[in-house]
Image (cartoon, grey):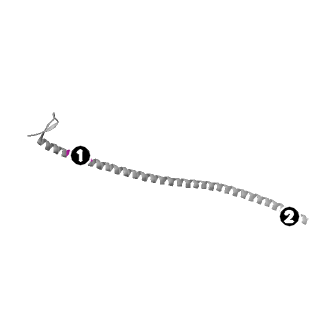
Amino acid sequence: MLSSLVKEHHAKQLARKEAQEEKRKEAIFAANNLTQALVNHLNVGVAQAYLNQKRLDAEAKQLHQSATNFSKHTQQWLTLVEAFSSALKEIGDVENWARTIEEDMKTVTCALEYAYKGTHIFNPSKSWFVKHE
C-alpha cells in the first residue's frame, strides 16, 4: 500500500512536471512570439525613420544646391543691374553734357546773331546779307 501511494505520488508529480514543462514551453513560445512581434514593429518604425532621414538628407542637399544656384544668379543679376545703372548714369551725364553744350551754343548763336544784326541787314528775297551803311 505504501509503495502504491509512493508510485501514485511519483506519477502525479511526473504528470505535474510534464504539464508544467508544457506550460513553460508554451510561455517561452508566446514570449518569443511577442518579442518577435515587438521587434518587427520596432524594425518597421526604424526602417521608416531611416527612409525619412534619407529623404530629408537628399532634400537638404537639393535645397543647398538650389540656394547656391540662387545666390549665383542673384549675384549675376546684381552685377547686371549695377552695370545698367552705371550705363544709365553715363547716358544721363552725356545727356546733361549735350544739353549744356546745346544751351551754350544757343547763347553763342544768339550773341552772334545779335552782333551780326547790329552791323548787317538781312535781305530775305536775295538770301544774303547786305552790309548796313
> Label 1 neighbourhood size at 10 Å, few (<14), some (14-19), many (20+)?
few
> Label 2 neighbourhood size at 10 Å, few (<14), some (14-19), many (20+)?
few
Q: Nearer the viewer, residue 105 or 69?
A: 105
Q: Amino acid at mark 2?
A: His
**What residue do we see at 35% from left, 50% from top?**
85
Question: Is residue 35 shown above or below 107?
Answer: below
Give the percent coordinates (x, y) of residue 121. 12, 38
**What residue do we see at 21% from left, 47% from top?**
104
Q: Is 114 left or right of 75, judged from the image as shown?
A: left
Q: Which residue is mark 2?
A: 10
Question: For residue 82: magenta?
Answer: no
Give the percent coordinates (x, y) of residue 129. 14, 38
Q: Is 62 left or right of 13, judged from the image as shown?
A: left
Q: Nearer the viewer, residue 76 or 27?
A: 76
Q: Amino acid at mark 1?
A: Glu
* CA distance separating discs 2 and 1: 133 Å
In the rendered picture of this protein, how many numbered marks are placed on residues?
Answer: 2
Q: Which residue is mark 1?
A: 102
Please report whichever mark, 2 or 1, sits nearer to the chain's N-terminal start: 2
Q: Secondary structure at mark 1?
A: helix
User: Which quarter of the rendering shows the C terminus?
Assistant: top left
Q: Nearer the viewer, residue 43 or 37?
A: 43
Place residue 47 in its image quadrant.
bottom right
Question: Is residue 122 shown above or below 13?
Answer: above
**What residue do we see at 34% from left, 50% from top?**
87
Q: Secondary structure at mark 2?
A: helix
For the record, the magenta segment spans: 98-107
